[in-house]
């Protein structure tokens, strides 16, 4: 039996927003559901520890494979992965579940989406939980241009803008790619350091130069790794990379959205050793969110819900018990 079968509830499917979305549901269908939104390059499977613990705590939880990932549809057009579509999918999921509002918990790219849910679909949001990914003010200019200037042309988000390039490099050896990314904080922090005079986070060169026989700092068991590898070998990475290819479009279309989040319970959990989304990035949040609680998970790198599941579960369940008692 695969890790996906043994560690996740049975997969379900819903027709939402013009696609078929796969999702995993656990716990009693009562109270306000918590929707877990994954990042890149991840899957609903990234939330396996949370689904089990929250079910045991009597909480209704749902984790979708989001657009472009896993068992969910992968439309071809790049513009089909903009924020309007990504948030629209979650609204459609709520409609399918027959609920008015949910608490949205997002990690990495999923974190960007759940904070935008509070701005774009406020009436469907009961609360927001950001894991690693802070709520950020709208950039003063095109974010890709700013990243290119600050980090260089080989920084991975800038590199991802090149049609087809990242898709091919990441798919060339999926197991190597997943093992490269899914490592403990010391390894990823070292990978984030720029070469002499080079770009920060230049993952293309770092991935291609990385010795795949290096088994140190691996985060996942062989069975867990296989769940990710088998999925991305089947789907490729284009769907996930297309989210990044909408940074400019999302920025252009976000003009006029609220700059603050008020009257909405929010929880922010940072990870002490996240090289990509450092706790320092969240320092401005109290000035932009009226009802905010913040915590930091000590010793965790970027893959917080998989690295430190017990601590993440404890922090979220404690907040839920106080703010959304059963």
Image: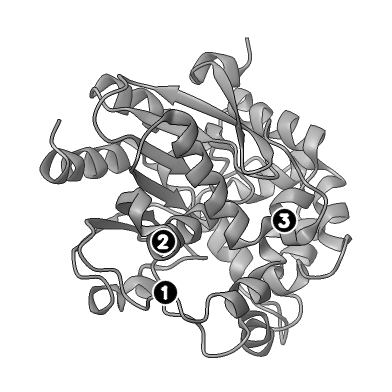
The quarter holding residue 132 reads bottom left
Number of residues whose C-alpha sits closer than 10 Å to that of mark 3, classed few (under 14), some (14–19) or many (20 or more): some
Label 2 vs label 1: CA separation? 9 Å
Q: Quadrant of the N terminus?
A: top right
Query: Which mark is on residue 32?
Result: none
- Of the 4 image quadrants, the one containing the C terminus is top left
Identify the residue at horizontal 77%, vertical 70% (top origin): 161
Q: Are marks 1 and 3 in contact (CB under 8 Å)?
A: no
Q: Quadrant of residue 317?
A: top left
Residues marked 2 and 1 touching at CB (< 8 Å) = yes
Residue 23 lies left or right of residue 200; in this view the side is left
What's the CA distance linking mark 2 and mark 3? 19 Å
Which residue position is annotated with label 3?
80
Locate residue 92 relative to residue 177 in the image: left or right: left
Look at discs 2 and 1 and give the one toward the viewer.
2
Mark 2 lies on residue: 115
- Determine the residue positioned at 67% across, 35% down: 72
Task: Pick whichever of labels 2 and 1 is earlier in the sequence.
Answer: 2
Q: Earlier in the sequence, mark 1 or mark 3?
A: 3
What is the spatial separation of the Cα atoms under label 1 and label 3, in whole angstroms?
23 Å
Residue 239, how many percent across, how many down?
A: 74, 49
Choose top left, top right, bottom left or bottom right for residue 265.
Answer: bottom left
Looking at the picture, tell me which residue is in the foreground, 258 or 229: 258
Left or right of 64 in this view: 213? right
Disc 1 marks which residue?
136
Vertical placement of 124 versus 162: above or below?
A: above
SS label for mark 3: helix
Percent across and percent down for residue 287 are 24, 79
């Amino acid at each position: 039996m695969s890790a996906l079968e043994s560690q996740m509830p049975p997969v379900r499917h819903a027709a939402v927003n013009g696609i078929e979305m796969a999702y995993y549901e656990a716990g009693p269908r009562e109270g306000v559901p918590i929707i877990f939104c994954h990042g890149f390059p991840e899957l609903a499977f990234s939330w396996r520890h949370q689904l089990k613990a929250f079910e045991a705590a009597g909480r209704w939880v749902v984790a979708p494979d989001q657009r472009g990932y896993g068992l969910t549809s992968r439309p071809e057009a790049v513009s089909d992965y903009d924020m309007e579509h990504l948030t629209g999918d979650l609204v459609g999921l709520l409609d399918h579940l027959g609920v008015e509002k949910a608490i949205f918990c997002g990690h990495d790219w999923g974190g960007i989406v759940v904070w935008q849910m509070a701005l774009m679909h406020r009436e469907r949001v009961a609360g927001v939980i950001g894991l690693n990914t802070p709520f950020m003010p709208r950039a003063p200019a095109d974010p890709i241009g700013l990243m290119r200037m600050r980090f260089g042309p080989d920084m991975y988000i800038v590199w991802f803008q090149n049609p087809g390039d990242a898709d091919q490099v990441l798919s060339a050896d999926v197991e190597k790619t997943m093992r490269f990314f899914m490592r403990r904080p010391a390894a990823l922090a070292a990978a984030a350091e720029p070469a002499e005079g080079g770009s920060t986070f230049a993952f293309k060169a770092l991935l291609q130069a990385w010795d795949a026989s290096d088994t140190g700092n691996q985060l996942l068991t062989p069975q867990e790794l296989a769940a990710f590898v088998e999925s991305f070998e089947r789907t490729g990475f284009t769907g996930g990379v297309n989210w990044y290819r909408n940074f400019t479009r999302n920025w252009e279309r976000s003009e006029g959205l609220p700059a603050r989040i008020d009257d909405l319970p929010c929880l922010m959990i940072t990870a002490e050793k996240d090289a990509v989304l450092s706790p320092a990035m969240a320092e401005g949040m109290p000035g932009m969110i009226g009802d905010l609680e913040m915590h930091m998970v000590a010793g965790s790198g970027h893959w917080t819900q998989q690295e430190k599941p017990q601590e993440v579960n404890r922090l979220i369940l404690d907040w839920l018990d106080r703010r959304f008692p059963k």
